[in-house]
Image (tube, helix red, strand yellow):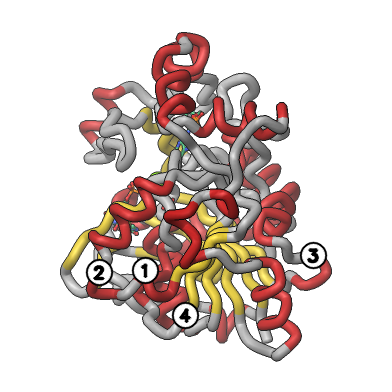
Amino acid sequence: MTCSILVGGAWGDEGKGKCITYLCNNDKPSIIARAGVGPNAGHSVEFNGEKYGLRLTPSGFVHNGAKLMIGAGVLVNPDVLFKEFEDLKKYDVKGRMSVDPRCAIITEDHIAKDKSFEHLSKTIGSTGSGCGPANSDRVMRTIGLAKDVPELADYIEDVSLACNEAIDNGEDIFIEGSQGFSLSLYYGSYPYVTSKDTTASTFVADVGVGPTKVDEVINVFKSYISRVGEGPFPTEMTQEEAESKGLEEYGVVTGRRRRIGYFDMELAKESCRINGATQIALTCVDRLFDCARVQDYSELSAETKSFISDIEQETGVPVTIISTGPDLKDTIDLRKELL
Ligand code: GTP
Ligand code: IMP
Ligand code: MG
């Protein structure tokens, strides 16, 4: 039995989508539960030559044998969820999805406020998905819950109960965090953050699993850093520099150009400490070093290996997953050797 949780190490978009898809396809957990803020997230999944952009569906959906769940702490926009049911028809996401009755519901009004309130849309640079105003209404105790939405009736299930029963039965479960450590309302670069804490402790609370049940906390870092929206970014490089290194990126939800920077060791140390990381997954190593599609650790250059061992030494956490391309095969999985 293993209860694993995966979290973003920096400002989101670390490549969690790829890592989750790889891990779920490989480890075959019985439940994949989505934690985090809500549909402000955008995860890219490439599987069998097709590319999907997800906002609410767990990125592990490609493992057909798993039940898919959205925990009570996550904000749900039913329109986003139903669109993903359509887009992912061939994976029967609809037939496998459960939504906790206590999820709070995003309305058009929340989205309109997110886009028109300049403090959010301009100063912070929010995603405009309604999450900030919805979490604000949740704190004010005025928001509607999933249990009261007739269109969601077929999907309502106590996610906490299902996850805990699976753990007690000795099954593997996988909890997907979204966003990233530096976007945490508590630990990120306030006020340039999202509308709740985004560390592992909150993600387990989101799905109603207690901290004593968690075995592995996998912290995902990209080999460089990206940030969308406003706020401090100590290791940021100029756009010209990012272009010359071929590191340009655009967001999945907003299409905005991402700011790019160098790997930040101080941030990595803090992120591992506060998340209680037991493993690191390092993505896009091929975009920083010349190792596209390498699947064997021994084939990495000395420079790449030294980058990886510096991260392990500084954070005290083993780098167990090394991603060298978008395809699931482009993954070096060292868990058997290192754990
Ligand atoms: P999360 O929000 O953390 O899930 O990341 P994301 O999915 O939002 O990241 P993004 O939208 O930037 O997508 C990353 C793109 O890079 C997707 O097309 C992925 O399939 C791809 N990708 C993921 N890992 C790697 C990698 O190791 N190397 C390369 N070259 N591409 C990758
Ligand atoms: P909000 O969560 O939409 O309120 O946006 C607040 C800040 O968090 C903005 O800088 C967003 O760009 C950022 N943000 C929220 N979710 C994500 C994500 O999944 N990836 C990257 N940035 C995010
Ligand atoms: Mg993303």
Q: Rounded to the nearest whole Å, what is the CA distance between mark 2 and mark 3?
A: 33 Å
Mark nearest the camera among 4 and 1 is 1
Dot 4, crowdedness within 10 Å: few (<14), some or many (≥20)?
Answer: many
Q: Rounded to the nearest whole Å, what is the CA distance between mark 4 and mark 1?
A: 12 Å
| Amino acid type of the residue tagged 4 in the rendering | Ala
Circles 2 and 1, Cβ within 8 Å, touching? The answer is: yes
Task: Please name the residue that numbered disc 1 is placed on.
Answer: 94
Task: Please name the residue that numbered disc 3 is placed on.
Answer: 210
Q: Rounded to the nearest whole Å, what is the CA distance between mark 2 and mark 4?
A: 15 Å
The tag earlier along the polypeptide, 2 or 3, is 2
The tag earlier along the polypeptide, 4 or 1, is 4
Q: Quadrant of the C terminus?
A: bottom right
Taking the spot 59% from the left edge, 68% from the top edge, the residue there is 157
Residue 112 image label:
none
Mark nearest the camera among 1 and 3 is 1
Which image quarter: residue 31?
Answer: bottom right
Dot 2, crowdedness within 10 Å: few (<14), some or many (≥20)?
Answer: few
Task: Please name the residue that numbered disc 4 is placed on.
Answer: 66
Residue 215, percent across and down?
A: 72, 73
Taking the spot 71% from the left edge, 72% from the top edge, the residue there is 161
The tag earlier along the polypeptide, 4 or 3, is 4
The tag earlier along the polypeptide, 1 or 3, is 1
